[in-house]
Image (spheres, grey):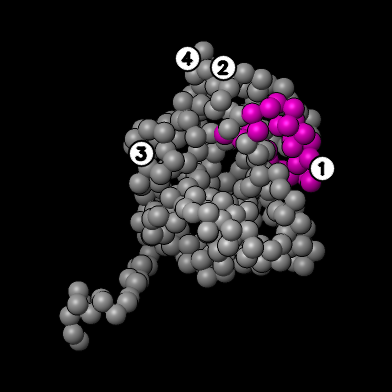
Amino acid sequence: MALPFIHIEEHKISKLICGTNSFLGFSHFSHARDTFLKRYFTVERIAEVMKACLEKGINAFVGPADQKLADARKMVEDETGQKMVWVSTTYGHIDKEKQAEEIKWLAKQKAEICLIHASYTDSHLISGKNKIEGIEDLLSLIREGGMVPGLSTHRPDTLPSAEAGGYDVQCYILPLNVEGFLCAVETNWQAEIIRRTPKPVIIIKPLGAGRIMPYEALSYVLANTKPNDPIAIGFMNREEVEEDVGIVEMLLSGKGEMKLLYSPSKSLVEGEK
């Protein structure tokens, strides 16, 4: 089967989308890995992974207002004639004016969707009053730039607060994974809040930034979220794109079997044949 698609307003995006933390050197693991990733992922290498995504039915990526991503996206479009949907975010500035500057920059890059970064959203949230201070102007600016507005957050209470507050928010970003990495509450509560929110919630950190094996990670996330929730995974190479797309297709169709990984020590577990 092919990957299903989800609509965020008029934009059609694949169920699985490309994360970009690795492209930009944010490993959530070590300074050494950050340094390697920043050196390794040139614009050309990012574009190669994006092209592999398109070949396997992934038509969108999620990432911040970064020139490297804009350049890679243009390279892919020039070489393939296909344009990836940019589910963009601002960077983690607390200052409202810096947020506004990045929104305007993303509009010039013709990003389709723009979500205010969690650092701003979460630091301005007053959940008891269903209020996010200063957010209305930023959401209006996103609309004026021709983009669909949304909120990125690490606080699950943002979702019911924003819905009750009546803000022009059409999608969210929130972490979810079986280990609870970067989740603010127990994973069953995090998942319940995602399911209670009718609008699409883009799931980030499904593999816990590389701490969870793909099959176990994706089995959990698919079983605990809605059909209209996209899942963002960072890919290092073409092989990871192919493997993770295959796992999602297998889990959604109920057909196929995940192959076990083998190493010399597995003979002790499996026994001689």
Dot 1 amino acid type: Lys
Q: Are marks 2 and 1 in contact (CB under 8 Å)?
A: no
Q: Which residues are magenta?
A: 93-118
Instruction: Give above or below for 33 relative to 148.
Output: below
User: Residue 94 lies in magenta, yes or no?
Assistant: yes
Residue identified by numbered label 4: 128
Disc with the residue nearer the chain's start (3 vs 4): 4
Instruction: Tell me the number on the disc at residue 131.
Output: 2
Disc with the residue nearer the chain's start (3 vs 1): 1
Q: CA distance from mark 4 to mark 1?
A: 36 Å
> Quick one: 57 or 266, which is closer to the camera?
266
Q: Position of residue 262 (x, y in %)?
A: 32, 75
Can you say which quadrant of the picture contains the C terminus? Answer: bottom left
Instruction: Tell me the number on the disc at residue 108.
Output: 1
Disc with the residue nearer the chain's start (2 vs 1): 1
Disc with the residue nearer the chain's start (4 vs 1): 1
Q: CA distance from mark 2 to mark 1?
A: 29 Å
Residue identified by numbered label 3: 187
Q: Position of residue 211 (x, y in %)?
A: 40, 55
Q: Residue furthest left?
A: 271
Residue 78 as seen in the image, left or right of residue 38: right
Q: CA distance from mark 3 to mark 2?
A: 24 Å
Find residue 87 and report its image quarter: top right
